[in-house]
Image: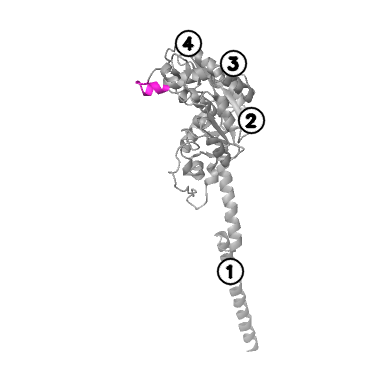
Amino acid sequence: MGCSGCRVRFNFGKVLSKVSVFFTMVLIFTYFFYCLTGLCESAPRALYSQQALDYDILDDHRRVLDDLRPSPRLLPDASSYWNRTATADAEQVDAPGQQHQQPVSDNGIPVSNTFGTKRFPQAIIIGVKKGGTRALLEFLRIHPDVRAVGAEPHFFDRFYDKGLEWYRNLMPRTLDGQITMEKTPSYFVTKEAPSRVCTMNCQTKLIVVVRDPVTRAISDYTQTLSKNPGLPSFQSLALKNSSTGLIDTTWSAVRIGLYAKHLENWLQYFPLSHFLFVSGERLVSDPAGEMGRVQDFLGLKRVVSEKHFYFNQTKGFPCLKKPEGSSRPRCLGKSKGRPHPQISSKVLQRLRDFYRPFNHRFYQMSGQDFGWD
């Protein structure tokens, strides 16, 4: 009887021990299950992990972009393809007055930094019309560290009332180390433009492409004549009176060539060190040499060089050699290289005499002799 009770107590204790082991295993299994699914982490730990995940994803995007960007040393011509592809994105801008919305990925992570930021331009090609500004911009866009607006924004002369935020939204997205640029040649001759640009940023770098003012005036007239065949003759527009030979400075084609007077207006707001004066003639005869100066001025590595150019005898202008994957070279549009009309030698000489003192003054102000005389 006593022994039987002992056996019962012994068996009950054994069963209780097994039940304890079973529940312990269930608890351990449940713990591991919840930990594996991430449900056992506390709220602060979850926030920290998500933040780390965000940075990992952004770093991955940056590495992908860096891998996609061609190395100028390895693929000098492919960089132009990268720039043109990126420029297509730049030209898809928000509608005027529309607030830009930060893009968000499917999982709610902001991705604006992945594709760069819209910034005010650090450098602007401000002039001059028919001097070679389009050629300079196209040559610069070869550089992988330059992003530029394709069309002329005309913000500081025509659309200033739309506001600086509207202007900034026109700019292409840039990554760290890239330069944002735009070109509008009429800025140089617009009286209000210097103060407006300085209001945006008085440290802005300014590039002026200048050309023999007589040749520039004829080129300007030729462009207008192509759009308006009924235009009066060059001589009748350039001279107030053919008998006296007085030059009509109210005609814009003549007035633009008074580079010294326009530069005086800009020097009221910007020091001379913020300007680079590019020779339109040398941009044609030695594009690589002028581009070297431009890249130095912008603080860029000299990527654009003589290997990117060849001279088109038909157009009389340098063209860009075809980039990787392109079927033909890139030349400026049909409007470039138009044949100029014949102008009387007396009118040309009168114009040269008129411009000479202004040219010499401009040489002194800019510190460069462009040899137009």
Residue on which the image places disc 3: 371
Depth check, front residue: 49 or 369: 369
Residues rendered magenta in the picture: 223-231
> Mark 3 or mark 4, which is nearer the start of the sequence?
4
Amino acid type at circle 2 is Leu
Q: Amino acid at mark 1?
A: Leu
Task: Judge whether residue 208 is colored magenta.
Answer: no
Query: Disc 1 or disc 4, which is closer to the eye?
Result: 4
**Residue 151 against residue 36 in the figure, above or below:** above
Q: Are marks 3 and 1 in contact (CB under 8 Å)?
A: no
Q: How is the image coloured?
A: one colour
Q: Measure the C-alpha gap from mark 1 to mark 4.
A: 105 Å
Name which of mark 2 and mark 1 comes first in the sequence. 1
Nearer mark to the viewer, of 3 and 1:
3
User: Residue 272: which disc?
Assistant: 2
In the foreground, 323 or 363: 363
Distance from label 3 to label 1 (Cα)? 92 Å
Q: Identify whether 178 is placed above or below 128.
A: below
Q: Nearer the viewer, residue 285 or 38?
A: 285
Amino acid type shown at disc 4? Lys
- The residue to which callout 4 is attached is 346
- Which of discs 2 and 1 lies nearer the camera? The answer is 2
Q: Position of residue 241 (x, y in %)?
A: 44, 17
Q: Residue at x 62, y 86 (%)?
A: 4
Tag 3: amino acid: Gly
Residue shown at 60%/77% (left/top)?
16
**Label 1: few (<14), some (14–19) or many (≥20) C-alpha neighbours in 10 Å:** few
